[in-house]
Image (tube, rainbow, N blue to C red):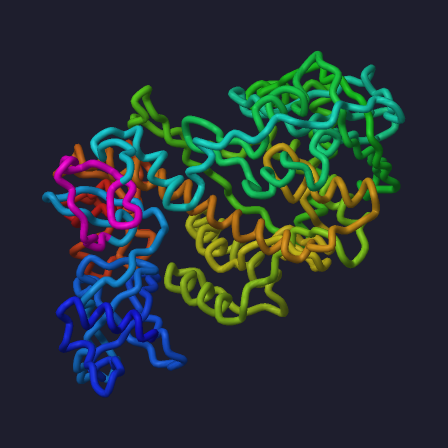
C-alpha cells in the first residue's frame, strides 16, 4: 500500500487502522486493503499485496461497498477456518455504472440486492436508477411500470447500448456483376407470419431432384473490418424478445436490402444440391453468388395447410417427402426431440397477458432439413480450420445421472454399447410409457452445450461429422464469417477469438431473454397472490415446479416440498412473487 494512501487514512481519524511510527505509516495487522469482487452470492477481497489468501465478505457486511470498490476491511475471527471480514471504509468507488433500485429510502443493487451507500432523497421507492461514482446519475423508470423490464435485462447483460447506439449505415453498394441470375426460379420464403427479416429462401426442382437454398448475402454489403462489421461483431446475434427484435444489423439492411423479401431482386449466396433419388445422399453441391427474386412469402401455418391437403402435384408436398427421407437418414446418427416453445403474449403496456405454445410442425421440419443440409455442405467445403458449430457427447457422469433419473420414473434403462444407442433406447421406452416429453427434457438437460469452434469437430446431437452455421447471416455473426471464408478461402487470423467471443455472447443473450421472461412471469403473479395453479415438478433437487396453465412455464420455488416424485402434477398456491429478484414462491396444496 502506498504511503500516501495510508497517510490519508491516518489523517481521516482512522488511527486504529493505520499507525505512524518512525516517519512511516503501517497498516494494523487486523485490517486489510483491497478491491471487492462479487460472483454469485459471494464477495471476496482481492488484496493489493501478492498474498494468495482469500478473504470473504458477507453481503450484509459490505457496508455500502460494491464490485471493484477499493476498501479497508477488518478481519473477523471465524471458527470454521474461512477467513471473513467486514468493510470499515470505502477508499475509492469503482467507475462502473451499477443498476439499482430504491427500497425503503435506501439504494440496493438489482442483481444481488446489496445495500449501496448513497443519498436517495430525490428518488421514490421503486425507482430503477443508475449509480455511478458515488451518486445516482439517471433513472430508467419505476419498477411498477412493466416497460422498465426491457431496460433492466439489457443493462444487466451489458446490452443496454442497443437502445442508445445506432450503428453507422455506411455499407458497400451491391455489385451485380458475376452473379448468376436466378430471378426466374420460383423461390419461396417460409417463416413465422410476423417475420420481417428473411434469411433464407428455398426452391426445389423435382425434375432434377435439386434443392436450392438461397441465403441473404450480407457479406455483399458488410465488409470485413468496417465500422458496420465491428458493430455486428459486438452484437453477434439479434435479440428476440416476445414483443420486439433488437437486430444485429441496422433495420435498413436486416429488413430490407439484405432480406429476401418477395418480389424484390436481392443478392443471395446459394447452395444448389443434387440428391440421389434412392439414397437421398448429396451427389454434388455447387455454391455461388446469385441474384434471386422470391416469388412467395409463406407462413408456417400456410405450408402446414398445404401439406395436410397432400396434393401430390404440389411442389411443397414433393419437397416434404424428400426432406422426410433426409430426416430419416439424419436420425440414424442424430436425435429428434419434442421441441415445444412457449411464446409470451404482451399487451401494449408490455404486461404479460397470455402465452402461445409453438410446436414444431411439418412445415418447420421441411425448412429445418433444407437448412441442415446447406449447413453440412458449407462445413464440408472448409478445411480443418474455419468456423464450425460443434457439440460434444454427454459425459459419463451425465449419462449415468440420466439413467438414474429415468429409472426413477419407472423406465428400466441400461447403458448400451455407446451413448447414441443408450439415448435412442431410452426415448423408445419413454414413448411406450407415455413419458416422451418428460424424458426428452431430461435428455436435453444431460447434453453438453453446443458452441462455435475454429477446429472441425463433430456435432453429437445432430449426428454430423461436418457442421457449421451458414443459413442466418442477418441474425448471427458466425454465418457472416463463414460466408467470407467460403468466398475468399481466407480464415481470419483471430478466428479462435471470434469463435470464443460469439459462443460467450450466445449464452449471455439466452440468459438475458430468460431474465426478461422470468421478470414478466413474476410481475404477472405478483398480482395473483393466493391463486392456485396446476403445475409440474421439474426439479426435485431445487424444489422447482413449472406452471401448466394461464402463464405456462413460470418457475415456482416450492416451500413445502416433501418428496413428491419428479414430473408429478401438483396444485400450487402462489405465496409471494418479487419482480426485482424474479423469485416466485408457492406451496403445494
Q: Specify the quadrant of the image occupied by residue 68.
A: bottom left
Location of the N terminus (image quadrant): bottom left
Q: Can you say whether 153 is above or below 182 in the image?
A: below
How many numbered discs, if any? 0
Q: In this rendered view, identify the residue nearer to me: 66 or 180.
A: 66
Q: In this rendered view, identify the residue nearer to me: 402 or 496.
A: 496
| Residue located at (70% from left, 20% from top) | 188
Asked if the magenta segment contains residue 126, the reply would be yes
Q: Is there any visible trace of residue 556 in the rendered image? A: no
Q: Can you say whether 128 is above or below 329 in the image?
A: above
Residue 447 horizontal/vertical position (percent): 52, 58
Asked if the magenta segment contains residue 33, the reply would be no
**Stretch in magenta:** 113-136
The reply, left or right, for residue 24 in relation to residue 179 is left
| Residue located at (37% from left, 45% from top) | 156
Q: Can you say whether 249 is above or below 421 in the image?
A: above
Q: Specify the quadrant of the image occupied by residue 233.
A: top right
Residue 113 horizontal/vertical position (percent): 22, 52
Amino acid at each position: 500500500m502506498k504511503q500516501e494512501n495510508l497517510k490519508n487514512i491516518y489523517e481521516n481519524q482512522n488511527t486504529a487502522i493505520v499507525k505512524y511510527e518512525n516517519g512511516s505509516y503501517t497498516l494494523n495487522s487486523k485490517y486489510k486493503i483491497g478491491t471487492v469482487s462479487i460472483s454469485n452470492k459471494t464477495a471476496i477481497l482481492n488484496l493489493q499485496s501478492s498474498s494468495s489468501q482469500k478473504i470473504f465478505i458477507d453481503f450484509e457486511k459490505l457496508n455500502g461497498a460494491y464490485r471493484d470498490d477499493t476498501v479497508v476491511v477488518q478481519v473477523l475471527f471465524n471458527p470454521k477456518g474461512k477467513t471473513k471480514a467486514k468493510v470499515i471504509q470505502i477508499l475509492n468507488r469503482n467507475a462502473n455504472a451499477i443498476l439499482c433500485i430504491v427500497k425503503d429510502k435506501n439504494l440496493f443493487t438489482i442483481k444481488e440486492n446489496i445495500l449501496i451507500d448513497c443519498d436517495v432523497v430525490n428518488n421514490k421507492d421503486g425507482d430503477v436508477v443508475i449509480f455511478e461514482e458515488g451518486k445516482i446519475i439517471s433513472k430508467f423508470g419505476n419498477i411498477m411500470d412493466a416497460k422498465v423490464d426491457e431496460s433492466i435485462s439489457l443493462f444487466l447483460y451489458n446490452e443496454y447500448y442497443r437502445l442508445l447506439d445506432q450503428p453507422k449505415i455506411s455499407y458497400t453498394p451491391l455489385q451485380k456483376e458475376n452473379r448468376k441470375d436466378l430471378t426466374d426460379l420460383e423461390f419461396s420464403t417460409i417463416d413465422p407470419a410476423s417475420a420481417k427479416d428473411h434469411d433464407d429462401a428455398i426452391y426445389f426442382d423435382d425434375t432434377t431432384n435439386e434443392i436450392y437454398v438461397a441465403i441473404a448475402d450480407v457479406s455483399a454489403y458488410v465488409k470485413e473490418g468496417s465500422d458496420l462489421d465491428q458493430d455486428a461483431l459486438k452484437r453477434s446475434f439479434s435479440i428476440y424478445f416476445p414483443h420486439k427484435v433488437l437486430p444485429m444489423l441496422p433495420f435498413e439492411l436486416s429488413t430490407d436490402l439484405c432480406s429476401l423479401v418477395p418480389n424484390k431482386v436481392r443478392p443471395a449466396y446459394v447452395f444448389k444440391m443434387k440428391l440421389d433419388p434412392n439414397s437421398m445422399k448429396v451427389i454434388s453441391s455447387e455454391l455461388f453468388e446469385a441474384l434471386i427474386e422470391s416469388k412467395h412469402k409463406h407462413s408456417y401455418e400456410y405450408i402446414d395447410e398445404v401439406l395436410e391437403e397432400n396434393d401430390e402435384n404440389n411442389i411443397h408436398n414433393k419437397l416434404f417427402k424428400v426432406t422426410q427421407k433426409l430426416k430419416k437418414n439424419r436420425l440414424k446418427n442424430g436425435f429428434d426431440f419434442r421441441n415445444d416453445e412457449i411464446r409470451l403474449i404482451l399487451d401494449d403496456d408490455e404486461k404479460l397477458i397470455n402465452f402461445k405454445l409453438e410446436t414444431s410442425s411439418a412445415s418447420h421440419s421441411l425448412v429445418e432439413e433444407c437448412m441442415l443440409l446447406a449447413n453440412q455442405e458449407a462445413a464440408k467445403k472448409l478445411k480443418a480450420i474455419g468456423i464450425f458449430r460443434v457439440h460434444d457427447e454427454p459425459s459419463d457422469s451425465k449419462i449415468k445421472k440420466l439413467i438414474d433419473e429415468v429409472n426413477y420414473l419407472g423406465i428400466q434403462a441400461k447403458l448400451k454399447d455407446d451413448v447414441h444407442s443408450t439415448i435412442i433406447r431410452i426415448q423408445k421406452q419413454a414413448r411406450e410409457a407415455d413419458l416422451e416429453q418428460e424424458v426428452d427434457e431430461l435428455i436435453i438437460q444431460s447434453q453438453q452445450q453446443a458452441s462455435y469452434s475454429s477446429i472441425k469437430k463433430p456435432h453429437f446431437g445432430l449426428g454430423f461429422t461436418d457442421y457449421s452455421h451458414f443459413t442466418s447471416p442477418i441474425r448471427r455473426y458466425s454465418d457472416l464469417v463463414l460466408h467470407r471464408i467460403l468466398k475468399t478461402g481466407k480464415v481470419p487470423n483471430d478466428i479462435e477469438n471470434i469463435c470464443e467471443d460469439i459462443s460467450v455472447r450466445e449464452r449471455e443473450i439466452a440468459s438475458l431473454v430468460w431474465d426478461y421472461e422470468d421478470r414478466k412471469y413474476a410481475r404477472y403473479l405478483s398480482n395473483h397472490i393466493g391463486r392456485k395453479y396446476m403445475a409440474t415438478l421439474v426439479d426435485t433437487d431445487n424444489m422447482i415446479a413449472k406452471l401448466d396453465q394461464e402463464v405456462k412455464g413460470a418457475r415456482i420455488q416450492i416451500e413445502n416440498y416433501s418428496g413428491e416424485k419428479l414430473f408429478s402434477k401438483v396444485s400450487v398456491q402462489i405465496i409471494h412473487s418479487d419482480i426485482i429478484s424474479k423469485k416466485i414462491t408457492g406451496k403445494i396444496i
